[in-house]
Amino acid sequence: IIPNYIQAASNCIVSGQHYLVCCVNDCEVMLDEIERKVAAPTARPEDILAIVGNMSSHVTVDDDQPPHIDASLRSQLAQISEAHSGEVPIHGRLFAQWLHYV
């Protein structure tokens, strides 16, 4: 179900009767790496910060540096974990929004 949603026409920039031009969601690349390293549905904020800070996948061709996580993003991740007993659900809406800004 999820792959069908990701590749749905609503995520494509050009669509016609016989073709679609779809873009890869950059956050998916990062989430895939986080999922492999966490290997659980939730993770502690400090574990997520360590993983994201040492990302091996590059989101863009122009950017070879790992994502920069400022104090505001660290605080937001901590707030997510506080609402979920100290763990961040990595497949939740709030984490997806956080990851988008990373």
Image (tube, grey):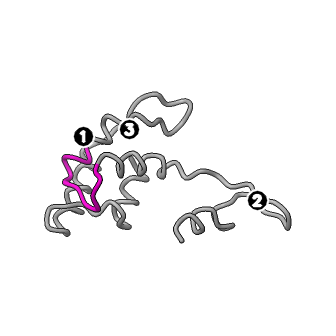
> Crowding near pointer 1: few (<14 within 10 Å), some, many (20+)?
few
**Image quarter of residue 77:** bottom left
Q: Which residue is mark 1?
A: 50
Q: Which element is circle 1 on? A: helix
What distance separates the C-alpha of mark 2 from that of mark 1? 37 Å
Of the residues shown, which amino acid type is indicated by label 1?
Ala
Q: Which residue is mark 3?
A: 67
Q: What residue is at 19 percent from the left and 69 percent from the top?
A: 83
Of the residues shown, which amino acid type is indicated by label 3?
Pro
Relative depth, front residue between 15 and 57: 57
Q: Which element is circle 3 on? A: loop
Percent across and percent down for residue 3 are 56, 64
Determine whether 8 is above or below 60 in the image: below
Q: What residue is at 38 percent from the left and 38 percent from the top?
A: 67
Residue 57 located left or right of residue 36: right
Q: Is residue 69 magenta?
A: no
- Residues drawn in magenta: 38-50
